[in-house]
Amino acid sequence: MVKAALITGGAQRLGAAMARHLAREGWAVAVHYASSSDAAEALVTELRDAGTTAEALQADLLQDAEVAELVPRAATALGMPLSLLVNNASIFEHDRLDTMTGDSWTRHIGSNLKAPVFLSQAFAAQAPRAARDAAGEPVAQAVIVNMLDQRVLKPTPEFMTYSLAKAGLWAFTRTAAQALGPDIRVAGIGPGPTLQGERQSPEHFARQRAATILERGSDPSEICAALDFILKTPGFTGQMLALDGGQHLGWQTPDVLGVE
């Protein structure tokens, strides 16, 4: 049976990789974007050409009204209630305690914490309830996956506001798992160095990956494998899968935290 998913920030990078993966697994996919309309439309065309039901939906996640409407819009566009919400959209900017501003705080908390919380609220209101297995035990039919970061385990002061927002989302992941079970499972994925940052040099990105305990980061296929594990493991909730090459344990060299 086809199920429906909404991926925020789904037009590019890890969001697009997860959209393609879900499509291959038979999901109908709503691809949310903020400003990347060309990338979103191209991805949706690609998915449709492969036989997937897919829709591109624009919304500004800093606007409460647009956040409130996104889940109902996705369900209507795909023609069924959503069974999966992937809170992937994120703002990622460099700041420190002595340089952070009220504007930066508002944007990071709004996009990286407030929007996922209220999208989850809307998702829970329409999600299918738990079914019963042969033993009569409940099996959740809906899942929320929050894209976290290894910084929730090892914060870095160079990304103060971002780290605070992601730590809040990690706390929400655990409390929402308690609040929404057994009908909905809530879990997180915490990537380390996976894709080169938009303002990061190739050399700095390579040093970051090489400086992890395993001397490598992860790649999009591993993030998709983690998503697959969460979706196919009925007993998994309130946890984060950290795919960071051991980065949360510390860096092998000390010169990789700066922004280049």
Image: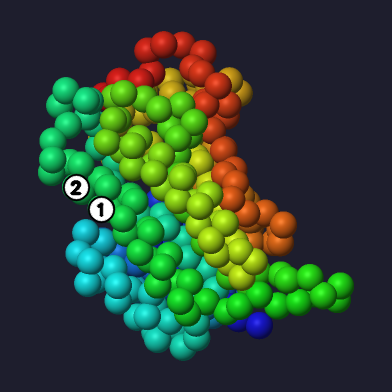
Q: Quadrant of residue 256?
A: top left
Which amino acid type corresponds to the residue marked 1 in the rendered image?
Answer: Gly
What residue is shown at x 46% (from left), y 45% (from top)?
171
Q: CA distance from mark 1 to mark 2?
A: 6 Å
The coloring applied to the image is rainbow
Would you say the residues marked 1 and 2 are in contact, meaning their CB atoms lie under 8 Å apart? yes
Which amino acid type corresponds to the residue marked 2 in the rendered image?
Answer: Thr
Q: Give above or below for 259 relative to 65.
A: above
Kindly tell me whether residue 38 is visible in this rendering: no
Extreme front residue here? 179
Element at label 2: helix
Kindly tell me whether residue 171 is visible in this rendering: yes
**In the rendered view of the protein, which quadrant contains the N terminus?**
bottom right
The spot of residue 226 in percent (x, y) is 61, 50
Q: Which residue is mark 2?
A: 106
Alpha-carbon neighbours of circle 2 within 10 Å: few (<14), some, or many (≥20)? some
The spot of residue 246 in percent (x, y) is 58, 26
Given residues 79 and 109, the one toward you in this image is 109
What residue is shown at x 57% (from left), y 38% (from top)?
243
Q: Is residue 212 left or right of residue 100?
A: right
Extreme right residue here? 135
What residue is shown at x 50% (from left), y 86% (from top)?
80
Q: Is residue 14 left or right of residue 24?
A: left
Given residues 25 and 160, the one toward you in this image is 160
What residue is shown at x 45% (from left), y 35% (from top)?
152
Given residues 56 and 103, the one toward you in this image is 103
Q: Is residue 137 left or right of residue 225?
A: right
Q: Give above or below for 87 relative to 57.
A: above
**In the rendered view of the protein, which quadrant contains the C terminus?**
top left
Q: Which residue is mark 1?
A: 110
The spot of residue 6 in percent (x, y) is 44, 69
The spot of residue 20 in percent (x, y) is 51, 63
